[in-house]
Image (spheres, rainbow, N blue to C red):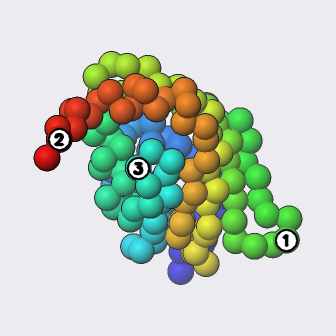
């Protein structure tokens, strides 16, 4: 029987996989029904969210600030990190973020809530989309 992932191991693996845009490694940290709530991409299954994120990414550097666990014993952790994101078109879009992960009994992520102020990245992110044409 495999031991559940510890919060620190989960976060270490997640950030390393995210920085490498390693889809298989990221999805291995989620349950099959895992979901992501993102300020830019909305609520999506993890298996749909990460391919879109990675296709929008030229490079990223992630710097962990802190990992926090729920004091009430709930299977929830949060991690605060700096995301130096470069969009696929080369535009820098850095921000500081807190991810809140609701965990399954085996330590994998069931639901991930991504929390950050989009003001600093919204313009660069939206510019990657073609303009809408009236119907």
The residue closer to the viewer here, 135 or 21, is 135
Percent across and percent down for residue 128 are: 29, 30
Question: Horizontal placement of 40 versus 112: left or right?
Answer: left
Q: Quadrant of residue 89?
A: top left
Query: Which residue is denoted by mark 3 in the rendering?
Result: 41
Percent across and percent down for residue 9 are: 61, 53
Crowdedness near tag 1: few (<14), some (14–19) or many (≥20) residues, C-alpha within 10 Å: few
Under tag 2, what secondary structure? loop
The residue closer to the viewer here, 68 or 53, is 53
Q: Which residue is painted at 72% across and 48% down in the image? A: 67
Mark 1 and mark 3: span between their CA atoms? Answer: 30 Å
User: Sequence-wise, which precedes: disc 2 or disc 3?
Assistant: 3
Query: Which residue is denoted by mark 1 in the rendering?
Result: 72
Q: Are the residues tagged 1 and 3 within 8 Å (C-beta)?
A: no
Query: Which residue is denoted by mark 2 in the rendering?
Result: 134
Mark 1 and mark 2: span between their CA atoms? Answer: 51 Å
């Amino acid at each position: 029987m495999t031991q559940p992932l510890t919060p620190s191991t989960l976060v270490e693996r997640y950030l390393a996989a995210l920085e490498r845009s390693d889809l298989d490694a990221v999805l291995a940290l989620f349950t099959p029904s895992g979901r992501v709530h993102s300020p830019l991409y909305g609520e999506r299954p993890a298996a749909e969210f990460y391919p879109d994120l990675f296709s929008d990414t030229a490079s990223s550097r992630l710097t962990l600030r802190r990992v926090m666990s729920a004091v009430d014993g709930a299977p929830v952790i949060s991690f605060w990190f700096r995301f130096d994101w470069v969009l696929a078109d080369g535009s820098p879009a850095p921000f500081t973020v807190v991810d809140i992960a609701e965990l399954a009994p085996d330590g994998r992520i069931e639901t991930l809530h991504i929390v950050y102020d989009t003001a600093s990245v919204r313009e660069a992110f939206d510019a990657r989309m073609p303009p809408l044409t009236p119907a």
